[in-house]
Amino acid sequence: MDQKQKMRSEARTRRATLTWAPFAEHIARFAGDLELPPGAIVAGYHPIRDEADPRALMSALSALGHPLALPCVVAARSALVFRAWKTGDRLAPNAYGIAEPLASAPEVMPSVVLVPLLAFDAEGHRLGYGGGYYDRTFDLLPGMRLIGVAYSGQEVVMVPREEHDHPLDLVVTENGIRRFLR
């Protein structure tokens, strides 16, 4: 097992112990502190398993005037597509069982992406699931602001990194916002 695979396994186990029921509502209070450009489209995600839940944060950002989107997987091992979404819009499971907007929802280009993760380090590097969907997407969309959403206990000393990995600009945890210098 390579270093990243081993770390993914350990991070999944650790994250499962970190879930905290009021997390989503707690991080929503940081929406105004993210310093997003007015009207910036924000892509979030619909959490699966024990992922840190960004939905209350997304609702708070929407209330501040930010249109929302969710990622959609259109093909295996390809970049994600983002479709417009707002609370109450119908979602359907994709091939991986992840809730996505319907194909009829318009495609949009977000300037901010809330990113799920297994682990992050003090330099803003994230450990994802290994499919590469987000990194392939970020390759095509330079300048996109990347915001990790995580439990503070998901921080590790160092995330192994490769040339294609994209670091986060900041991460939001129950303890507040961590900004990373670029």
Image: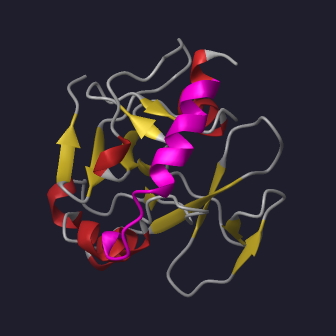
Residue lying farthest bottom?
Answer: 88
Q: Position of residue 30 (x, y in %)?
A: 19, 63
Left or right: 56, with 6 as reference point: left
Q: At 42% across and 64% down in the image, what residue appears?
A: 19
Dividing the image into 4 quarters, which one contains the C terminus?
top left
Q: Position of residue 71 (x, y in %)?
A: 61, 56
**Does the image show residue 136?**
yes
**Does the image show residue 128?**
no
Q: At 60% across and 83% down in the image, what residue appears?
A: 89
Up the image or down, 22 lies above or below 162; here it is: below
What is the basis of the colouring in this image? secondary structure
Left or right: 100, with 14 as reference point: right
Residue in the foreground of this view, choosing between 41 and 113: 113
Up the image or down, 56 lies above or below 45; here it is: below
Left or right: 127, with 181 as reference point: right
Q: At 48% across and 18% down in the image, what residue appears?
A: 160
Residue 176 quadrant: bottom left
Q: At 53% across and 13% down in the image, what residue appears?
A: 162
Q: Position of residue 10 (x, y in %)?
A: 53, 36
Dividing the image into 4 quarters, which one contains the N terminus?
top right
Q: Please check the rendered image and state whether residue 181 is part of the magenta-colored stretch, yes or no.
A: no
Numbered circles on residues, count: 0
Q: Please check the rendered image and state whether residue 21 is part of the magenta-colored stretch, yes or no.
A: yes
Residue in the foreground of this view, choosing between 21 and 112: 21
